[in-house]
Amino acid sequence: MSPTSFLVPPVDTVTYGAGAFDEISSRVAGVGGSRVMVILSGSLAGGPVEEALHARLGPAIAGVYARTRQHVPRSSVLEATEMARDNRADCVLSVGGGTPIDCAKAVALALRADIRRPEDFDHHRVRFTYPSTYEVPPLEGDVVPHVAVPTTLSGGEHTGLCGVTDDATRAKDAYTSPKLQPRAVILDPWVSAGTPGWLWAASGMRAVDHAVEGILSARHMPMTDALGAGALRLLSENLETSSTDPGDEQARTACLLGTWLSIFGLTNVGVGLSHGIGHQLAAEFDMIHGVTSAIMLPSVMEFTRARTLPRLRLVAEAMGVDTRDLSADAAADAAIGAVRDLVTRLGVPDRISAAGGRREALPGIADHVMGDAAVAASPRPVTRADILALLDAAF
């Protein structure tokens, strides 16, 4: 048996709970920021969160960019990077969901690598050839530090990975380096209180997907199993309540913490087909990733069940099912059923067609999925025909 390493993302601090946002100025100063480029969710622009940012950071704010389009097209990153250059930013601060968080990482990359044209991104993207060949370009030199304040449960604030969409091809490419990891993270339920319930619920399904696919990964390990199970407990117990009552600070904080626990699987053992398919579905049809998780995760769990029966029992138990008297197959049914039931209770779309997809685009999506590095962690080998069958069944 070969040795295995558990990697802790290189974050300096995670500050959480009611009032955590009040620490923003000290966290920015702690990473050396004096001219802060804010990458803000468009829905927060001009509202109380932006006002609170200005009140706490004042003249340290060098600029605010609030126009990142969903799935972070290269054009948005270039626009934000130009603003950061013009304002001589020495720190990026993302406030919002996965879109501004990934944009801030991509801006940090573009500043370091002197990316100025859409084609300049190509040299830096991760290249994957199925089943297990990766080309990850190194990122040399110092990168401007990033402080992240999430308003959804996407989990991007806890990784050095970002997705950027090629405007021309609509393929979503991955970029990764430990240097892109946010140095400080603030998890405050107040900042997310304005996030619509449907978006909070859908992004919560993304966190559930992180946890489940980490547990089911072909490379699973005890540490990520435990963290993933803890994430599922927090999310399954609090996600519905926090979606319907944004003022429930305890439930919202529990979900933010569950999201934090869920991400260690992605950063250590990888995820799988639900993520690989979801990346490309989202980019093609402009879906949010939580919706793609709600659509694909139960089907992928069924697709891999023969190779993951003991793992599925752990998923079922973490989601509150008493499996002591259940056979392996019954426990697997319970795990898949628990995920489907959560999707139903949250009201997240569970079909591609219901989320605005078009059947004629599915073959092209299957092609892109085979080049997505997430599929390498699938516990069952997969072909393009398998992916197309999963997409067709989920339509």
Image (tube, grey):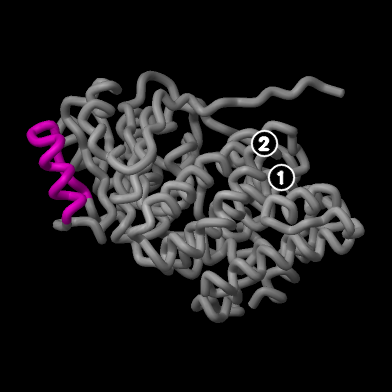
At which x and y percent is residue 139? 45, 26
Q: Quadrant of residue 294?
A: bottom right
Q: Could you say which disc has been placed on residue 215 in the image?
A: 1
Circle 2 packing at 10 Å, graded few (<14), some (14-19), many (20+), is many
Q: Which residues are magenta?
A: 48-65
At which x and y percent is residue 131? 75, 44
Mark 1 residue type: Ile
Could you tell me if the residues under marks 2 and 1 are in contact, i.e. CB atoms within 8 Å? Answer: yes
Residue at 78 percent across and 20 percent down: it is: 3
Residue at 23 percent across and 36 percent down: it is: 22
Quadrant for the N terminus in the image: top right
Label 1 residue SS: helix
Above or below: residue 40 compared with residue 42 = above
Residue marked by disc 2: 224
Label 2 to label 1: alpha-carbon separation: 7 Å
The reply to whether residue 103 is visible in this rendering is no
